Amino acid sequence: MIQVKEFVDSDNSYAENKANIFLAGLKEEQVINICYGSVVKSSVSKTERQRSTILIVYKTEE
């Protein structure tokens, strides 16, 4: 079965660390694709925050 796992955080190193821990538990042939996106959001108080998203598409072992 093909599944997805998403890691989202405002601190890209947190999302990266969590994704790497998850990937360490998979076999290489299970990984189908890894996508990364990052946006900067402005708030009403004119501060900016970066949000990072890592999406891992993988096969489960059946």
Image: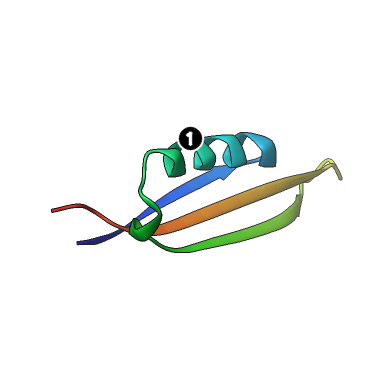
Q: Residue at x 13, y 53 (%)?
A: 62
Q: Nearer the viewer, residue 32 or 40?
A: 32
Q: Position of residue 29 (x, y in %)?
A: 35, 59
Q: Is residue 50 visible?
A: yes
Amino acid type at circle 1 is Ile
- For image coordinates 48% across by 56% down, the residue present is 55
Q: Residue furthest right?
A: 46
Q: Residue furthest left?
A: 62
In this picture, residue 45 sits left or right of residue 22 = right
Residue 56 picture location, percent across and down: 44, 56
Where on the picture, by quarter, is residue 4?
A: bottom left
Q: Residues within 10 Å of mark 1 (few under 14, many from 20)?
A: few
Q: Is residue 21 above or below residue 43?
A: above
Is 23 left or right of 29, judged from the image as shown?
right
Give the number of marks.
Answer: 1
Q: Secondary structure at mark 1?
A: helix
Task: Specify how the rendered protein is coloured.
Answer: rainbow
Q: Quadrant of the N terminus?
A: bottom left
* Res 22 → quadrant: top left
Q: Is residue 45 above or below residue 27?
A: above
Position of residue 58 in the picture relative to residue 41 (left or right): left
Kindly identify the residue that appears in the image at 50 percent across and 45 percent down.
Answer: 7
Report if residue 11 is visible in the image: no
Instruction: Name the one closer to the observer, 31 or 11.
Output: 31
Residue position marked by numbered label 1 in the rendering: 21
